[in-house]
Amino acid sequence: MQKISVNAGFTCPNRDGKISTLGCSYCNNSAFNPSYCTPEKSITQQITEGIEFHTNRYRRAEKYVVYFQAFSNTYAPIPVLREKYEEALSHPGVIGLTIGTRPDCVNTGILNYLEQLSKGKFITLEYGVESCYDASLLRINRGHTFEQSIFAITETAKRGINTVVHLIFGLPGETSGQMLHSAEIISQLPVNSIKLHQLQIIRDTPMALQYRAKPEDFHFFSLEEYIDFIIDFTERLNPAVMIERFSAEVPPRFLEAGGFGLLRTDQILQKIEKRMDERNAWQGRLYKELPRSDSEF
């Protein structure tokens, strides 16, 4: 099975003026959008070209999950969502959707529609949570609170929809203790999977300007630091939560600071696994189920 990204032409309330026009300070969608993904093409054409791209790069898969990746992919009226999602699901070989969005871009109506859709197809909602701390969310101009993340995750899980959260490690102002405590906070939520990213400064973003003006405000993990930190985090994480990725990468032409050279995510994963063996570490070794009141939501 292969995941195929598409750009369905959605925008974001943090860009269209509903919340802000500046966007999240770290965000440049061009840094992770495959070359075949442009909203000028139909979703059907993007899927067809995506299958060809992945077949040439890897091999032809038997089934496909379409990844609505760019911007906020639930930020539209339900009839618009239905048109776009169901066009993707009608493509031969497509068995489901992964829908990337923000916690403040879902409501009861959208979640009820996705619940119905998930009864016949594999549906995943990926939420850009990014941080468990409102001070960090404000600093990166995220435009929502962590309480909104809790609501979105909880309501999604109630409907039996697969739920994924993204976290960024190394945001300015967050301590190592806070980042590690995020494992305990997320572990108390009904999350199926998590994607972990080290902070990277992407060119042509507000954060890149902030970094140039005050580089002392930023601390970037060295590779060895990050490997040990991520193992510490993993040991505190509920073992029922699947870790889909441990690190992030962008094409070098977009990277201002914060990467790990030419190492790819699979190579970093190998180093993490090797270090876990050396430390006799495993996911959930230090996990403790906490009362909700202790989770500092």
Image (tube, helix red, strand yellow):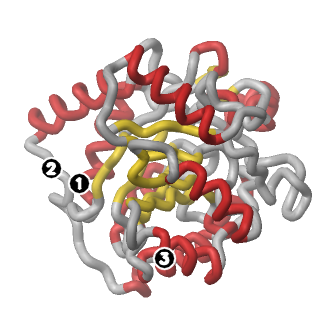
Quadrant that contains the N terminus: top left
The residue lying toward the viewer, choosing from 106 and 194, is 106
Residue designated by label 3: 116
Nearer-the-camera pick, 194 or 89: 89
Question: Which residue appears at 10% of the width and 33% of the height?
Answer: 278
Q: Earlier in the sequence, mark 2 or mark 1?
A: 1
**Secondary structure beneath label 1:** helix
**Which residue appears at 41% of the width and 15% of the height?**
56
Asked whether disc 2 touches disc 1, contact meaning CB atoms under 8 Å apart, the reply is yes
Q: How many marks?
A: 3
Could you tell me which secondary element the residue under label 3 belongs to? helix
Q: Which residue is mark 1?
A: 235
- Amino acid on which the number 2 mark rests in the picture: Trp
> Going 63% across and 22% down the picture, which residue do you hit?
35
Q: Can you identify the residue that label 2 sits on?
A: 282
Question: From mark 3 to mark 2, how far is it between C-alphas?
Answer: 37 Å
Q: Nearer the viewer, mark 3 or mark 1?
A: 3
Does residue 105 appear to the left or right of 227 in the view shown?
Answer: right
